[in-house]
Amino acid sequence: MPIRYSTNWMGPINMDWIEKNGSDWAGGRIDMHGGDWSYPEEIGLPMMKQEDFNKFSNWLDTIETDDVWTLQQLVEQYEKTNSKIVWHTTPKWEMDK
């Protein structure tokens, strides 16, 4: 059964955070559907520029995989044909390069 992905926006909604960092950020989670589980599985999705979140979300709506991919795998595949995501905080896999 193929695995499908979709984003779920969860913020930022804290006004203090928005005042400090600006309002053009988005984060949340990626919901994965289609596995052997009865409810969607989740991957945390760190804060990124709102425009990148929207483009990444649209791209995820088109992806199906045979097994569950990590956030790193999804982002690396996305960035092969799209611009690099601008993260609020650099992801660990980027720091390890």
Image: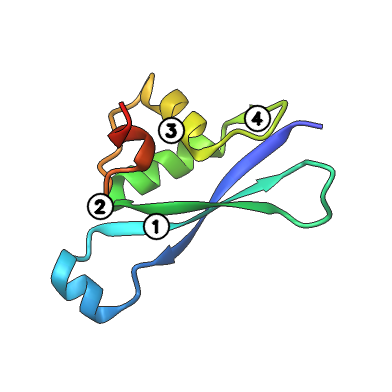
Disc 4 crowd, CA 10 A, few/some/many (<14, 14-19, 20+): some
Q: Is residue 34 left or right of residue 94?
A: right
Mark drawn on residue 92 = none
Asked whether the residues under the numbered discs 1 and 2 touch, taking CB atoms below 8 Å apart as contact, a structural biologist would say yes
Residue tagged by mark 3?
A: 75
Asked whether the residues under the numbered discs 1 and 4 touch, taking CB atoms below 8 Å apart as contact, a structural biologist would say no
- The residue located at (34%, 43%) in the rendering is 91
Q: Secondary structure at mark 1?
A: strand
Q: Earlier in the sequence, mark 1 or mark 3?
A: 1
Q: Is residue 95 above or below residue 76?
A: below
- Mark 3 to mark 2 CA distance (whole Å): 15 Å
For the residue pair 69 and 22, the one nearer the viewer reads as 69
Mark drawn on residue 64 = 4
Q: Quadrant of the N terminus?
A: top right
- Mark 1 to mark 2 CA distance (whole Å): 10 Å
Answer with the quarter of the image where residue 67 lies.
top right
- Which of the two discs, 1 and 2, sits closer to the camera? 2
